[in-house]
């Protein structure tokens, strides 16, 4: 199955339960984008730490404070990344029923609360 086939499949699936399912896909896509952005931001800071450490050694500068504040930022970004990744994982493992918004397992075909057929 090529990329276009899988996109077509997603689009067809979305059309079946329009607003609901597309809303969830948009949400999941946004979260995945956020993961990419956070990883970029972390890498940018790693690079800066490397440069500061290099210039500190090469030119005997005291970059300790700058490095420490970058490390704090990296820690905060990493914990945000963990939260977003956990949310992506959680969204993957549930199927929401359109009737009562009840959460079901990803493998369920019918809603455990109302018996509605799940997409
Ligand atoms: Zn239901």
Image (cartoon, grey):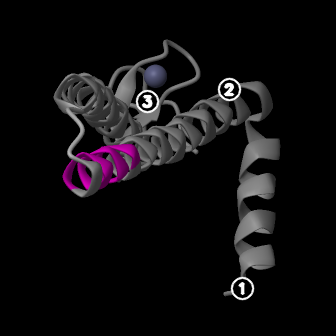
| Callout 1 secondary element | loop
Task: Report how far apart the C-alphas of labels 2 and 3 lie in the structure.
Answer: 17 Å
Q: Earlier in the sequence, mark 2 or mark 3?
A: 2
Judge left or right: residue 67 versus residue 100: left
Residue 36 sits inside the magenta stretch? no
The overriding secondary structure of the stretch rendered in magenta is helix
Q: Is residue 20 visible?
A: yes
Label drawn at residue 2 = 1
Q: Residue furthest front?
A: 59
Residue 2 percent location from the top left of the image: 72, 85
Q: Nearer the viewer, mark 1 or mark 2?
A: 1
Q: Nearer the viewer, residue 112 or 48?
A: 48
Label drawn at residue 115 = 3
Q: Is residue 108 visible?
A: no
Q: Residue at x 80, y 56 (%)?
A: 12
Q: Residue at x 42, y 21 (%)?
A: 114
Quarter of the image with the C terminus in it: top right
- What residue range appears in magenta? 48-57
Task: State the image quarter where residue 21 is shown.
Answer: top right
Q: Residue furthest bottom?
A: 1
Q: Earlier in the sequence, mark 1 or mark 2?
A: 1
Residue 53 sits inside the magenta stretch? yes
Label drawn at residue 20 = 2
Q: Nearer the viewer, mark 2 or mark 3?
A: 2
Task: Report how far apart the C-alphas of labels 1 and 3 lie in the structure.
Answer: 34 Å
């Amino acid at each position: 199955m090529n990329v276009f086939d899988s996109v077509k499949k997603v689009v067809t699936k979305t059309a079946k339960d329009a607003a609901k399912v597309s809303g969830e896909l948009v949400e999941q896509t946004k979260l995945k984008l956020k993961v990419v952005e956070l990883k970029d931001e972390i890498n940018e800071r790693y690079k800066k730490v490397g440069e500061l450490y290099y210039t500190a050694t090469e030119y005997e500068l005291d970059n300790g404070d700058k490095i420490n504040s970058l490390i704090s930022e990296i820690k905060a970004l990493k914990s945000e990344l963990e939260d977003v990744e956990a949310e992506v994982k959680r969204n993957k493992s549930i199927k929401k029923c359109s009737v009562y918004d009840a959460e079901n397992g990803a493998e369920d075909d019918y809603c455990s609360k109302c018996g509605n057929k799940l997409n």
